[in-house]
Image (cartoon, rainbow, N blue to C red):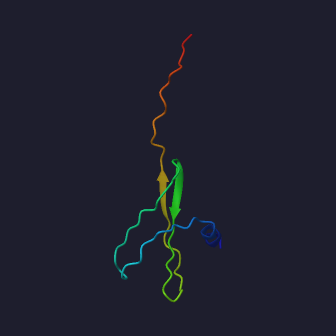
Amino acid sequence: SAMDSWWNAATVVTGLPTPKISGSAETFAVPGPFTTGASYYFVLVAIDDAGNRSLYSNVAVKFLPDTLPPRAIIDLRVR
């Protein structure tokens, strides 16, 4: 499917912590580097101890806006 090809081309995030007990809340900060002006899509798949794979999770999207102000104008000339 289209999702499988997208998944296979994705960057794998490493360094994930050991999963907590089922039903426990978990958080994880994905390390960069990231590019401003780009959108990043996050999808999870869980695999249990027997190797059974879950369906894809909902897709979370994060856009990183360019927040740097433009450089100061240093060569403006008026005629």
Q: Quadrant of the C terminus?
A: top right
Residue 67, quarter of the rendered image: top left
Q: Where is residue 24 in the image (x, y as percent from the top left)?
A: 34, 77
Q: Which residue lies furthest to the front in this view?
A: 15
Q: Quadrant of the N terminus?
A: bottom right
Residue under the image location 42 percent in, 62 percent down: 29
Residue under the image location 47 percent in, 57 percent down: 62
Residue 19, quarter of the rendered image: bottom left
Q: Residue furthest bottom?
A: 50
Q: With respect to residue 47, does 40 lie above or below?
A: above
Task: Give the side of residue 29 with respect to residue 45, left or right.
Answer: left
Q: Position of residue 6 (x, y in %)?
A: 62, 67
> Could you say which is closer to the camera, residue 37 or residue 15?
15
Residue under the image location 51 percent in, 75 percent down: 45
Task: Give the side of residue 58 with respect to residue 21, left or right.
Answer: right
Q: Position of residue 30 (x, y in %)?
A: 46, 62
Task: Give the side of residue 69 with respect to residue 9, left or right.
Answer: left
User: For the image shown, how many numbered marks are present on the structure?
Assistant: 0
Q: With respect to residue 31, does 2 lie above or below?
A: below
Residue under the image location 41 percent in, 66 percent down: 28
Q: Position of residue 42 (x, y in %)?
A: 50, 65
Q: Residue furthest top?
A: 79
